[in-house]
Image: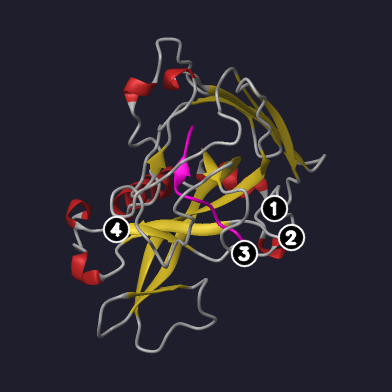
Amino acid sequence: MTKQRRRVLAAAVVAAGAIPIGYGVLEATRPPSFEPSTSDGDLERGRIHTELYRGASVPDEVVVMALPNDCKSHLDLDIKWDKKKNKVEVHLKGKRALDPNPVQLRTEGVDYFPNAFWPEAKDVVNGRYLLWIITVPGLTSFYYDHLTLELLGTEYDFETPPEDAIEIRIPAFVAVPTDFIDVKPNGDVDFRHTFEYDGLVRGDLPQYSHFVASFVPQTLCKAHPYDYTQTSSRPYASPTLPASAALPFSEYLENGLIFDITVEPPEYHTFPPISTNVVTYS
């Protein structure tokens, strides 16, 4: 990807309300010991180290739950990849970082808003955690009814575009999780997961890969064509795609990486599952 294309895509991501890269960082959550991310290598082989903090990126309608140690802990994330060996190795580690079997209760109209385009459980009791690998590979076609101006869905919801629909191309991200994170009774985390480089599939359900999501107006009546700050956007998630649609890790590297840890209910709310909008570290 050229530098110019990266700049254009980054600007489009912010304009369209997708999870921003390098935006929305809450500096107050970073302790003085914060260390910048480091990386080396290329698409064939390399490594990344980064620290994850509570609420580092908070898009629309996302709840950042309280965490142990007065929310002062962080997680160290190391990723190593080797295309020849067809491996992407993930190592997540931290002290007193996560509560085992977390509970997050939400109130409709306050911190939970039912959403047909991103169905999720209102409450999480006896929950579990997923680490998501996220990137923004490009634009997705969103379709709106030409009469009502209401959102109909995306190219992932229809085999062919709905008749007479208004099509708008909007940046969207793809997200694929590891398996569920093991948390020790004292809140310590020392978790490892390995993806296959040539196609990242869900760690918990390897018959599936990523889903596609963004934060968009659900009606064009509440969308400003030139000013996102005057647009009312909400989360959208596509159906989770099959393993045959899995993207190679090179796609994630080339388009920039985002990491997020979500809190999931003990049983899948939909199937195939997507994720909740309850998060911890990112």
Q: Are marks 2 and 1 in contact (CB under 8 Å)?
A: yes
Residue 201: which numbered mark, if any? 1
Prevailing secondary structure class for the magenta stretch in the rendered image: loop
Measuring 51% from the left and 21% from the top, which residue is drawn there? Answer: 74
Q: Is residue 279 magenta?
A: yes
Query: What amino acid is at disc 4?
Result: Ser
Q: Relative to 70, is 92 on the left or the right?
A: right
Q: Which residue, given by chain and number where applicable, does mark 4 sit on?
A: 233
Q: Position of residue 205 (x, y in %)?
A: 71, 54
State the separation of the CA atoms marked 3 and 4: 25 Å
Disc 1 secondary structure class: loop
Residue position marked by numbered label 2 in the rendering: 207
Outermost residue, bottom side: 163
Q: Which residue is mark 3?
A: 271
Say which quarter of the image contains residue 233.
Answer: bottom left
Question: Considering the numbered disc 4 on the image, is that residue within a helix, a strand or a loop?
Answer: loop
Residue at (56%, 46%) from the top-left corner?
A: 264
